Image: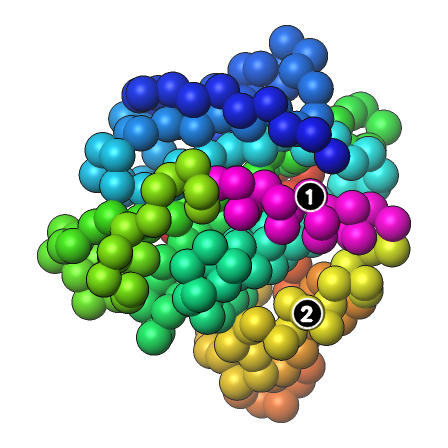
Amino acid sequence: MEFAVHALDTTDSTQSEVQRRAAAGAPEGTVVTARHQRAGRGRRGHDWWDATGQSLLASVLLRPGGPVTTAPQLSLVGGLAVADALAAAAAVPARIRWPNDLLVDGRKICGILAEASSDSGGRLHHVILGIGVNLAQTAFPPTLADRATSLRLVTGRAPEVHLVLAAVLEQLARHYESWRAGGFAVVRAAWLERSTLPGQIVRLPDGSDGIGVDVGDDGMLRARAADGRLVQIVSGGTLEEGVAHAARD
């Protein structure tokens, strides 16, 4: 898979910018990065905070085809790719917290937002995979200070953004091609090895808390409800013409 990277200084959102390019026919592998987003967004409509030049902010256009039900799996593939990239580029052993956060020592270092669009026949038109990695921050706003971290705080230095991006794209290409060839089942073991499951507290569809047990070959979470029921959960998100996405809050 080949990537074409378009580096911007400032934009409203790399997700929105790639969406505009996708609508205009941009090819798979189109990547938009920015030093700052004026309106970055995360899961469930939350804002995505960044300090100018201190994060990797990137969105990648994918055109996998196939049924819309497979779209949420790509947020999991993205999390696996970033986990492997951080290990390769900075020797940082990040853990994946369902569905799409990456943690180091229990604090969030990366979030992923996968937004998908379908055609009228219910097949994927495209998926936009947004990736935000904290690189150089030494402090965070009070609302984030006790639950966020950065590569600088973890390692004592901030790697160059282009090196982290290169590592992320290399790992994304590898895992995406595996996924396209064999579905989530092919990457499931690697994802579980890097995840905080089993035992993670997760939000169930009815709003209550459950305990994560496993992720199946279909990419769905199996969680145990308080009454003992085993519940299946798709990574949550928004729809555009009927497609699921996962998130980056």
On screen, residue 134 above or below 232: above
Structural crowding at the residue carrying mark 1, measured as other residues with C-alpha within 10 Å and reported as few (<14), some (14–19) or many (≥20): some
Residue position for label 2: 190
Q: What residue type is labelled 2?
A: Ala
The total of numbered circles placed on residues is 2
Q: Residue at x 45, y 46 (%)?
A: 164
Q: Where is residue 10 in the image (x, y as percent from the top left)?
A: 31, 21
Label of residue 235 in the image: none
Does any portion of residue 37 appear in the rendered image? yes
Residue 111 in the image, given as x and y percentages of width and height:
43, 52
Q: Name the residue under label 1.
A: 173
Give the residues drawn in magenta, as a range: 165-181
From the viewer's side, name the closer residue of 232 and 101.
101
Is any part of residue 101 visible from this angle?
no
Q: Residue furthest top?
A: 24
Look at the numbered disc 2 and give the secondary structure of its residue: helix
At mark 1, the secondary structure is helix
Q: How far is mark 2 from mark 1, CA to CA? A: 15 Å
Residue 179 in picture, x, y percent from top left: 78, 52
Give the side of residue 173 with respect to residue 44, left or right: right
Closer to the camera in the image, 215 or 190 = 190
Q: At 81% across and 63% down in the image, what residue appears? A: 186
- Assign the magenta stretch its main secondary structure: helix
* Residue at position x 57%, y 72% in the image: 194
Comes first in the chain, label 2 or label 1 = 1
In this view of the protein, which residue sits in the foreground, 4 or 234? 4
Q: Which colour scheme is used?
A: rainbow
